[in-house]
Amino acid sequence: MVRCVLESKSERAYQVIRLRLLDGTYGPGDRIVLPEVGAELAMSVVPVREAVRRLEAEGLLEFTRWAGARVPNFDERQLAEAIEAAALLEGEIARLAAPYLRREDLTAMRRENRLLRSAETSGDLEDARARDRAFHAVVHARCPNRLLVLLVETAYVRMDTLRNVFEHQPQRVGNATAEHQRLIEFLAARPDADEVGRAFRQHGLDAAAEIARWDPTGRHPRPERIRSNPP
């Protein structure tokens, strides 16, 4: 019973800290003071430490003996790597989800894309990020491999602890809207699942190339990108 209570408290602490990483409450370089979080959540430091260790394993926090837990300072290359990792995961998620997508899913994707276009018009980049994620969440919901979905969500959090990528490259909103529309039209034609995976993967890789510029000095050259036939 004691172990169950500890696990329950640790899960609560994990969810609270993870949400704060996602919404920007904790930003790059911020320290997570474990006793303060424990006091705020009315629990001891033990479950908070367990939650921090879990987030550290996911690459979302750093923990050192003397400095404690803090949000990593990601550089541009790390951001590019996170976006690229998400793109590869999105491709596999879409491939697995393709046989299960329904007509109403395409309707939901069209709705989210219209809202994304409205966010672009209004200049609300935070809403744009939410609508972009909601567009992809429609596909995620049909993926039978829930671990892949959890992994891509973790990649999203890793990206968001640095910045809203649309704030980094605002023109990406309009480009994403156009690409989403092409993906919807592609899906409406009921393509092969492997083709769906390649299309979604390339969508993410194109975003990685546009949003996160690699080192122009050439010290860290862009890796060979996976190309697929455009939808």
Image (spheres, grey):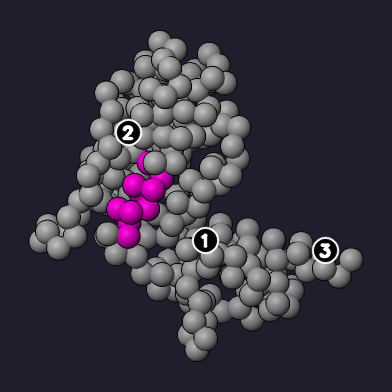
- Residue 20 appears at what percent x and percent y? 53, 61
The alpha-carbon separation of the residues under discs 2 and 3 comes to: 42 Å
Residue at the bottom extreme of this rendering: 66
Q: Nearer the viewer, residue 110 or 231?
A: 231
Q: Secondary structure at mark 1?
A: loop
Q: Is residue 106 left or right of residue 37?
A: left
SS at circle 2: helix
Point 78% across, 69% down: residue: 6
Q: Is residue 86 magenta?
A: yes
Vertical placement of residue 182 versus 24, above or below: above
Looking at the image, residue 160 sits to the left or right of residue 15; the answer is left
The tag on residue 4 is 3
The residue tagged 1 is 58
Residue ID for mark 2:
203
Q: Position of residue 110 (x, y in %)?
A: 43, 21
Task: Count residues near mark 2 (Cα–Cα under 10 Å), then give few for <14, some for 14-19, many for 20+.
Answer: many
The location of residue 206, given as percent across then percent down, is 26, 38
64 is within the stretch colored magenta: no
Check disc 2 and give the amino acid type: His
Q: CA distance from mark 2 to mark 1?
A: 25 Å
